[in-house]
Amino acid sequence: MSSKREGKATRFGYSDGLLILGEKHSDVVILDADLSKSTTTNRFREKFPDRSFNVGIAEQNMLGIAGGLALAGKTPYVSTYGVFVAGRAFDQIRTTICYSELNVKIGGAHGGISVGPDGATHQALEEIALMRVLPTMKVIVPCDYIETRKATIASYYEKGPVYIRFGREPVPIITTDDTPFTFGKGEIYKEGNDVSIIACGPLVSEAIDASEELSKEGISARVINIHTVKPIDEEIIVKAARETHAIVTAEEHQLFAGFGSAVAEVVVKNYPVPMEFVGINDTFGESGEPDELMKAYGLTSLDIYKKVKKVLERK
């Protein structure tokens, strides 16, 4: 069931978005924690060296500097691995940035288990939960390179803190320049009436593959991409629950308190239906090739397919 679509890493969508913003807006500045090559923001530094700052391996300090720059009228984009910025600098994000509603944007690179050989210490599997729990913080998890570029550009126009999650490895490109992208609004990528598969990030592509396999068996699966995890599009979720009466969520993140939990909060409050969840099941990752890890931890189209079969039995 694996996808054969052309792939490109979402981290390049992030830096492409920053380059576009840098051309249009002189207030955009970049802060890195010694990882600009990995996050690809070195491309911004090459073009705008006077607006790019490497603070070294000092994530907490970096968020403090970003807060000061925001107060001075700049729009800082803080870029490093998601596991480091959300983990090491959580207090600064919470108290300095979110409590004061400062206009700081955070690029969380290497999201998910598909980081691969870097292993558990570098695989951000908890940061969606950490970021979405914070008041005033907005969270975006784009599905591919093109959507990451759009999300990065859109983040500039959302005043206040924004967290953008993106990955290291190439993922299938499933959108185009013409595909709608509206902050806070989900999109239906495939219509269906029997079940709704609601996904974010690279799992959107896997959801499409699963729906195509299910259609061979006469199962009509709706596929919904929700790139904005917070504020989440309640309308599209409730509509899916009312019309299909069964939901499967899919994310490259811990199941506890993550994207699936966010969807479930909407469902249980508005129109409870049977739900199943695809994600990391309360465990740390390990080193391995990205495709092998996605299979080992149950994050493929086959795993979504199985959960759809299970939820349909409960419908």
Image (spheres, grey):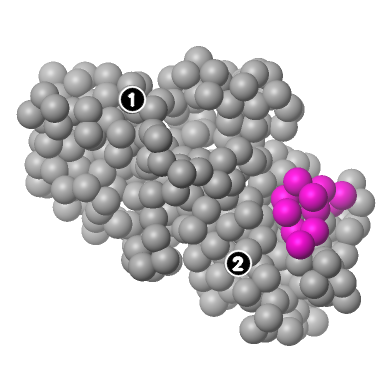
Q: Is residue 301 magenta?
A: no
Crowd rating for badge 1 (residues with CA inside 10 Å; few <14, some 14–19, many 20+): few
Identify the secondary structure beneath mark 2: helix
Label 1 vs label 2, nearer the camera: 1
Residue at the spot 30% in from the left edge and 57% down from the top edge: 187
Q: Say which quadrant the N terminus sits in.
A: top left
Residue at the spot 83% in from the left edge and 67% down from the top edge: 46
Q: Residue furthest right?
A: 56
Q: Is residue 37 magenta?
A: yes
Is there any visible trace of residue 160 in the rendered image?
yes
Q: Nearer the viewer, residue 238 or 312?
A: 312
How many marks on residues? 2
- N-term-proximal mark, 1 vs 2: 1
* Residue 75: image location, x then y, percent: 70, 75
Residue occupied by mark 2: 17
Q: Where 45 sits versus 258, above or below?
A: below
Q: Nearer the viewer, residue 238 or 301?
A: 301
Crowd rating for badge 2 (residues with CA inside 10 Å; few <14, some 14–19, many 20+): many
Q: Quadrant of residue 121?
A: top right
* Residue 273: image location, x then y, percent: 17, 35
Identify residue type, mark 1.
Answer: Met
Q: Quadrant of residue 122?
A: top right
Residue at the spot 24% in from the left edge and 58% down from the top edge: 235
Q: Say which quadrant the C terminus sits in.
A: top left
The magenta-colored residue range is 33-43
Q: Which mark is residue 1?
A: 1
Q: Where 128 sits versus 164, above or below?
A: above
Identify the secondary structure beneath mark 1: loop
Does residue 134 appear left or right of residue 217 in this picture?
right
Does residue 105 appear left or right of residue 294 in this picture?
right
Identify residue type, mark 2.
Answer: Gly
Q: Where 220 sits versus 237, above or below?
A: above
